[in-house]
Amino acid sequence: MSDKINNSDQEQHRISKVYLKGFSFRDKNQALRICVFELGNPLMQHKHIKSFTKAVNLFDSGLADPEFTRYFEVGSSKVETNYPKVLKAISITGTLDQGNRDHLIRFVPNLLIRQIRYRDFFLLKIFEHPNIRTKLYNEISIFHENPDESKKIWELVDTDLPAKEQLNLFSGEIWNHLMEVLSRFTFVILKANPNTSWFTSDNPVILEKRENEEAWILPPQSEIYFPMSREYLLFLYNHRVHSNNPLRKYPSDCVSVVSRELQHEIMWNRIRISAHRYIICGDDIGEIDLRTN
């Protein structure tokens, strides 16, 4: 790796600041803020995006070798710089070209690996159970261009290390695998109706249809919802697997205005209930019912 890595403590964000900008506004001091509803509290709060979901050394591997310590975080910083360009291109052209599709293939799984529900409640459990961990390695090896390289990285994962450190060390390999899987998915871009907007949560990448999740870290039948910004939501699916989801009727790789009924259903029955702790809005929408059942 050519980037120089600083081994001092680093503030890292669970949710990318670049992503949050798509739901932000500027306060009177020109600082970027988001409107946030915390589960259990129907009143809105304003949060600075520079401090929201921030923690020290959150994704560090814990290895002494500086080349590996922040491998995932350095890679994340490179990928997220292209995201505003993707949104701008979609807004201008109304389409998703191959270059911007490739950017999303890198960005979406990066956010997925970071978020609490997937990372802490699913991936972390894999590293806590050796038998499931072996399945993870076997799945990743399916698409790996260089299995020997993957094996070398896998061997660095000392089973005596705490599960969290094992996960941090192997996050780059999981990321690469998820990119390979998503490259086979179909992309649908749904624009919010006039005078409305999408909101998101602290689990912005929503996975559905994961009934056999112990067999796959991303099952082939998965359907994915990703609020890209206040204006756009990305829906991803595997066209090789049948589903009656009405969103599959929309054309791929171009912008479509979703029906009001479907927009409401996605926001309240997908995005809202996926939240771990926070609903994130681009606008002050007053009080909100945050009950999830």
Image (cartoon, rainbow, N blue to C red):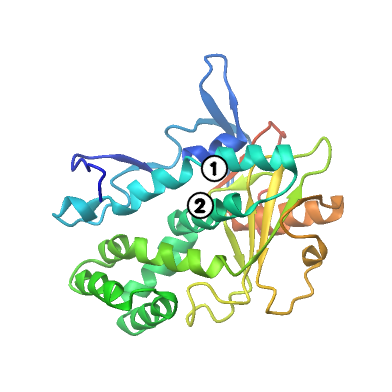
Kindly identify which numbered label has been placed on residue 264. none
* 81 and 282: which is toward the camera: 81
Q: Is residue 153 above or below residue 190?
A: below
Can residue 106 be seen here? yes
Q: Which residue is mark 2?
A: 107
Q: Quadrant of the C terminus?
A: bottom right
Residue 287, located in which quarter of the rendered image?
top right
Residue beneath disc 1: 83
Of the two numbered discs 1 and 2 on the same chain, state the one appearing first in sequence.
1
Label 1, secondary structure: give it. helix
Residue 180 located left or right of residue 167: right
Q: Residue at x 56, y 34 (%)?
A: 21
Residue at x 32%, y 49% (from the top left corner): 58
Compute the Cα span from label 1 to label 2: 8 Å
Tell me the crowding category of disc 1: few under 14, some 14 to 19, or many 20 or more residues within 10 angstroms, Cα based: some
**Residue 42 visible in the shown view:** no
- In contact (CB < 8 Å): disc 1 and disc 2: yes
Q: Position of residue 72 (x, y in %)?
A: 34, 53
User: Residue at the location (40% across, 48% down)?
Assistant: 76
Residue positioned most to the top? 28
Left or right: 266 in relation to 28: right
Nearer the observer, 31 or 93? 93
Q: Amino acid at mark 2?
A: Phe
- x, y percent for residue 141: 38, 78
Q: Position of residue 41 (x, y in %)?
A: 60, 42
Determine crowd level at label 2: few under 14, some 14-19, many 20+ residues with C-alpha closer than 10 A.
Answer: many
**204 in relation to 47, above or below:** below
Q: Is residue 64 above or below residue 281?
A: below
